[in-house]
Image (cartoon, helix red, strand yellow):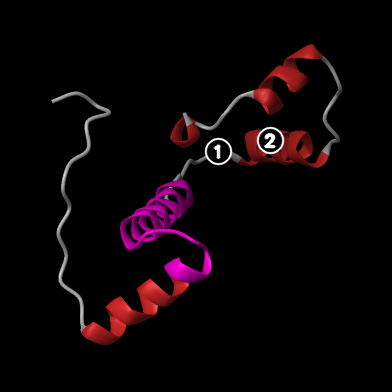
Amino acid sequence: MTQTAPISINIRAKARQRDLIDQAAARLGRSRSDFMLEAACNKAEDVLLDQTFFVLEKNAFAAFQAMLDAPPTSGERLRQFLATKSPWDK
């Protein structure tokens, strides 16, 4: 099976939950599957991004914080970076 071949994911839900999902999906003109998959992937991305942890010594943290607080310098590398799709959007 290739990375792009669709696979089945099965879950059980209460009728009330299904109806709520169906109502929201219909408002967006989406299928239940598309709506649920997008919502689940968005939540998964949030969880994974929030779980990034690293440790710095006091001086290194101060330098890191100063870089974050400084405005970005405009240039070709920044334009390329901003034009690049996120890995989950590819």
Mark number displayed over residue 56: 1
Q: Position of residue 75 (x, y in %)?
A: 83, 16
What are the residue bounds of the magenta stretch? 25-50
Mark 1, secondary structure of its residue: loop
* Mark 1: amino acid: Leu
Mark 2 / mark 1, whichever is N-terminal: 1
55 or 75: nearer the viewer: 75
Residue visible at 48% across and 41% down? 54
Question: Please, is residue 89 above or below residue 15 in the view?
Answer: above
Check whether the beta carbons of the residues at disc 2 and disc 1 lie within 8 A of each other: yes
Question: Please, is residue 43 above or below residue 60 in the view?
Answer: below
Q: Quadrant of residue 69?
A: top right
Residue visible at 49% across and 35% down? 89
Q: Position of residue 49 (x, y in %)?
A: 47, 47
Q: Residues within 10 Å of mark 2 (few under 14, many from 20)?
A: few
* Mark 2: amino acid: Phe
Q: Residues within 10 Å of mark 1 (few under 14, many from 20)?
A: few
12 or 68: nearer the viewer: 12
Q: Is residue 82 left or right of residue 76?
A: left
Question: Please, is residue 90 above or below residue 25 in the view?
Answer: above
Mark number displayed over residue 22: none
Q: Quadrant of residue 26?
A: bottom left
Q: Report how far apart the C-alphas of labels 2 and 1 lie in the structure.
A: 9 Å
Q: Is residue 19 left or right of residue 86?
A: left
Q: Position of residue 35 (x, y in %)?
A: 40, 59
Total numbered labels: 2
Residue that mark 2 sits on: 64
Nearer the viewer's eye, disc 2 or disc 1? 2
Residue visible at 68% across and 35% down? 64
49 or 19: nearer the viewer: 19
Q: Quadrant of residue 76?
A: top right
